[in-house]
Amino acid sequence: MTTLPPCPQCQSEYTYEDGANLVCPECAHEWSTQADAAAEADDALSAVDAHGTPLANGDSVVLLKDLKVKGSSLVLKQGTKVKNIRLQEGDHDIACKVNGTALNLKSEFVKKA
């Protein structure tokens, strides 16, 4: 038998499953277990820099080479420090802002600062 979490509203221990939702019989509160799974999936994002160091949300990184920005004449110079990165799914696995411009970077072109 699996242990279900208590009700987030009334803390009742008598919760039960109803399809994809959990239900509290005392206060009739329903909540989704899929929201918990989605939150855990966001935490599971991972990326490593060019040297194999793990990166996390909020880290600062330094560019290892000059990068041309597609659709713009902007060139990001080697050694530029990018603060407060966010990890995301996909080929360009880092979302960030450089000089107020939102960009997506590949982790293979950065090192952790």
Image (cartoon, helix red, strand yellow):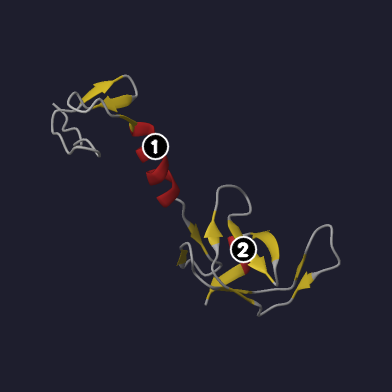
Discs 2, 1 touching: Cβ within 8 Å? no
**Along the viewing direction, whichever of 2 and 62 lies nearer the viewer:** 2
Disc 1: which residue:
35
Q: Left or right: where does residue 76 sit relative to residue 31?
A: right
- Secondary structure at badge 1 equals helix
Instruction: Please indicate, yes or no, whether residue 70 appears anywhere in the rendered image.
Output: yes
- Toward which corner of the image does residue 12 lie, by quadrant? top left
- Toward which corner of the image does residue 105 lie, by quadrant? bottom right
Q: Amino acid at mark 2?
A: Cys
Percent of width and height locating residue 32: 35, 31
Percent of width and height locating residue 39: 40, 44
Disc 2: which residue:
96
Q: Earlier in the sequence, mark 2 or mark 1?
A: 1
What residue is rendered at 22% in x and 35% in y? 7
**Along the viewing direction, whichever of 11 and 101 lies nearer the viewer:** 11
Residue 20 vertical position relative to residue 11 in the rendered view, above or below:
above
- Judged by depth in the image, the label closer to the viewer, 2 or 1, is 1
- Secondary structure at badge 2 equals strand
Q: Amino acid at mark 1?
A: Ala
Task: Please tell me the numbered disc located at residue 105.
Answer: none
Q: Left or right: where does residue 73 sit relative to residue 16?
A: right
Instruction: Please indicate, yes or no, whether residue 44 appears anywhere in the rendered image.
Output: no
**Label 1: how many Cα within 10 Å (few below 14, some 14–19, many 20+):** few
Distance, label 2 to label 1, CA atoms, is 26 Å
* Residue farthest to the bottom, as pictured: 79
